């Protein structure tokens, strides 16, 4: 399942939009932090889905600003992908886990420094996400956008707990 396709189709469910408005909506929702959306791919995705019949061009405005609307076929595809997303378990690809596999290639002081830096970064990010809860609604985001923040906070807090435990294990020479 392509998260970007699902997001694009989903943003067009209520009204036709330009690619710029689709991008603004996804940015408001914070999709770049939880869906690995490359915002530059939105315009390509819109054109490709129009070619596939999932979207239709509603209007071509000044400066080539194209307004896209979702077709019945696009709505059907959206709902298929939506249900699939609730039922599929996909691996979360995280470069940190890849690096973790080679922790034995780092000198102990460098490993401890990397863990300390990661802990600080995780603490900062968790706090930033916590402060963001409720704030996006003032700009038109639906309330359930906060649930993505809560899920992200939970995953980051789990990683934070692991990192804190790992520091002790590295210091005790149990790791690596």
Image: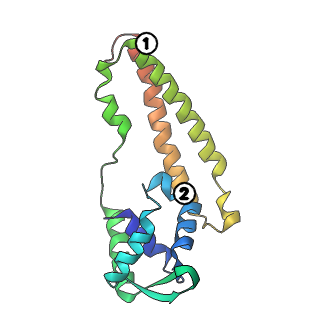
Label 1: which residue?
109
Seen from the viewer's position, the closer of residues 21 and 63 is 63
Q: What is the secondary structure assignment of the residue under circle 2?
A: loop
Residue 59: x and y in percent read 51, 89
In the image, taking residue 126 as reference, residue 118 lies left or right, namely: left
Residue drawn at 43 percent across, 75 percent down: 9
Residue 146: x and y in percent read 58, 57
- Residue 102 visible in the current orientation: yes
- Residue 79 visible in the current orientation: no
Residue 67: x and y in percent read 51, 83
Residue 29: x and y in percent read 56, 61
Quarter placement of the C terminus: top left
Q: Quadrant of residue 110?
A: top left
Spot the residue most to the top.
Answer: 172
Q: Looking at the image, is mark 2 or mark 1 earlier in the sequence?
A: 2
**Quick one: label 1, few (<14), some, or many (20+) residues within 10 Å?**
few
Instruction: Give how far apart the Cα atoms at labels 2 and 1 are.
Output: 35 Å
């Amino acid at each position: 399942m392509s998260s970007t396709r699902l997001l694009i189709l989903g943003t067009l469910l209520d009204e036709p939009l330009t690619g710029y408005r689709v991008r603004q909506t996804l940015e408001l929702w914070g999709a770049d932090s939880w869906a690995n959306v490359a915002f530059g791919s939105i315009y390509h995705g819109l054109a490709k889905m129009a070619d596939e019949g999932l979207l239709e061009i509603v209007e071509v405005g000044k400066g080539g600003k194209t307004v896209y609307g979702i077709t019945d076929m696009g709505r059907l595809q959206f709902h298929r992908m939506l249900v699939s997303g609730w039922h599929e378990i996909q691996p979360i690809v995280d470069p940190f886990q890849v690096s973790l596999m080679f922790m034995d290639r780092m000198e102990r002081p460098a490993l401890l420094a990397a863990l300390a830096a990661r802990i600080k970064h995780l603490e900062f990010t968790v706090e930033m996400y916590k402060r963001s809860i409720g704030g996006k609604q003032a700009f038109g985001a639906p309330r359930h956008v906060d649930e993505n923040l809560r899920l992200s906070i939970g995953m980051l807090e789990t990683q934070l707990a692991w990192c804190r435990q790992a520091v002790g294990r590295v210091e005790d020479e149990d790791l690596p």
